[in-house]
Image: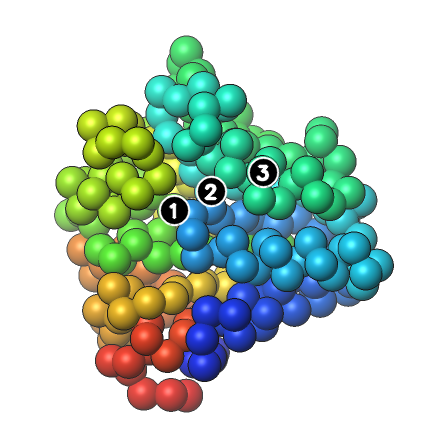
Amino acid sequence: MRIYIEEDYVSMSKKAALIVASQIILNPKSVLGLATGSTPTGMYQELIEMYKSKEVDFSETTTFNLDEYYGLEREHKSSYYTYMMDVFFKYINVQKNQIHILNGKAQNVVTECLAYEELINSVGGIDLQILGIGANGHIGFNEPSKKLNVTTHLVQLTEKTIQDNSRFFDRKEDVPREAISVGIATIMKAKKIVLLASGRNKAEAIMEMTSGYVNTQVPASILQTHSDVTLIIDKEAGVLIESV
């Protein structure tokens, strides 16, 4: 695991964007696994600027998002579909039919999950997976548990995650209690993984995920067993670990 501790959020975002852009320049047909939330927003903004300056071309790129709230319409202002469109996709030249985001209103969630796995497999898997990390160590919406699901599945969100994500909703009561998430094994099949973390509230999770032990109560800790993981964090998130 390569660890970069950057001075601040802006520096972290720039380094992450450079890695994504390099992946696409080297392989224009790259399959990207994408994350949502506040952490990767800066990275997306950097990539938009790189696209505008013709440094990177997304026209042949395929994307798969990690997760979506279950029960939200795609048009809901707090859905991850809306987030991706408003924050990233509408500003670049990625083809609409190459964008894949789970359907939070799927009538048959099992069928939706199986179809998503089949789509990922049909394109040869994820070349570069971008991850954030929850304060409780979750990746995607794979929450701390005695057991971790290996493939795309329906998740019962923890109270900690609901509380943390309530800032994206008008009221805490509006946060869905369930989500659909790509599973741990699907994440681990990605050829390369980049995990981003910013802020002191992520420091404990970062310390636990880099501790040398795999613990299902800290789902991100399994990334220590992957052959190509890059961790990019700011100083506040890295305050409890040594610089490498």
The answer, for residue 212, to whether it is visible in the render is: no
Q: Is residue 48 left or right of residue 133?
A: right
Q: Type of residue at label 3? A: Asp
What percent of the width, then of the height, locates residue 113? 44, 27
Give whichever of discs 1 and 2 has the lower sequence position.
Answer: 2
At label 2, the amino acid type is Leu
Q: Secondary structure at mark 3?
A: helix
Where residue 164 appears, as percent x and y from the top left, is: 25, 47
User: Tags 3 and 1 in contact by the CB under 8 Å rule?
Assistant: no
Which residue is disc 1 drawn over? 140
Give the amino acid type for the residue marked by disc 1 in the picture. Gly
Q: Mark 2 Cα within 10 Å, few/some/many (few <14, many 20+)?
A: many
Q: Quadrant of the N terminus?
A: bottom left
Q: Pointer 3: what residue?
A: 86
Closer to viewer: mark 3 or mark 1: 3
Quarter holding the C terminus? Answer: bottom left
Residue at the spot of label 2 = 66
State left or right for residue 190 relative to residue 47: left
Q: Upstream in the sequence, badge 3 or badge 2?
A: 2
- State which quadrant residue 73 falls in: top left
* Contact check, label 1 and label 2, Cβ < 8 Å: yes
Image label count: 3
